[in-house]
Image: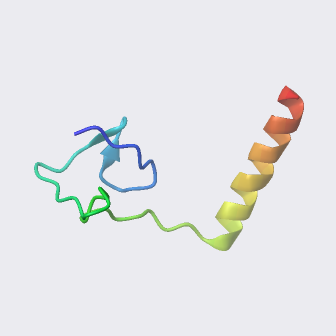
Amino acid sequence: MYCENRYCVYNFEDYCTLDEQTLDIQGRCEECLYIPFTDQQLKKARERYLKQAERED
């Protein structure tokens, strides 16, 4: 099954690695497990992204 959630541990190259998935009423995967990021990791990622976006402008 195609998966757009890059932060789910089951996502591999935009496809779910689970054999079966269950979707809730809003179409979200009920088995989704998010990869935990610390606040520091998230801050660094945001800073890198903003620097890259500024260079592209």
Along the viewing direction, whichever of 25 and 52 lies nearer the viewer: 25
Residue 26 relative to residue 49: left or right: left
What is the quadrant of the C terminus in the image?
top right
- Residue at far bottom of view: 39
Q: Quadrant location of residue 52?
A: top right
What is the quadrant of the N terminus in the image?
top left
Percent position (x, y) of residue 21? 17, 54
Is 19 situated above or below 39? above
Percent position (x, y) of residue 49? 75, 44
Which residue lies at the image location 60% right of the left edge and 71% below the top edge? 38
Is 14 situated above or below 11? above
Scheme by which the image is coloured: rainbow
- Residue at far top of view: 56
Q: Quadrant location of residue 41?
A: bottom right
Which residue lies at the image location 44% right of the left edge and 62% below the top edge? 35
- Residue at far left of view: 19
Residue 7 relative to residue 37: left or right: left
Residue 11 relative to residue 35: left or right: left
Is 54 situated above or below 6? above
Which residue lies at the image location 41% right of the left edge and 49% below the top edge? 5
Residue 52 relative to residue 38: left or right: right
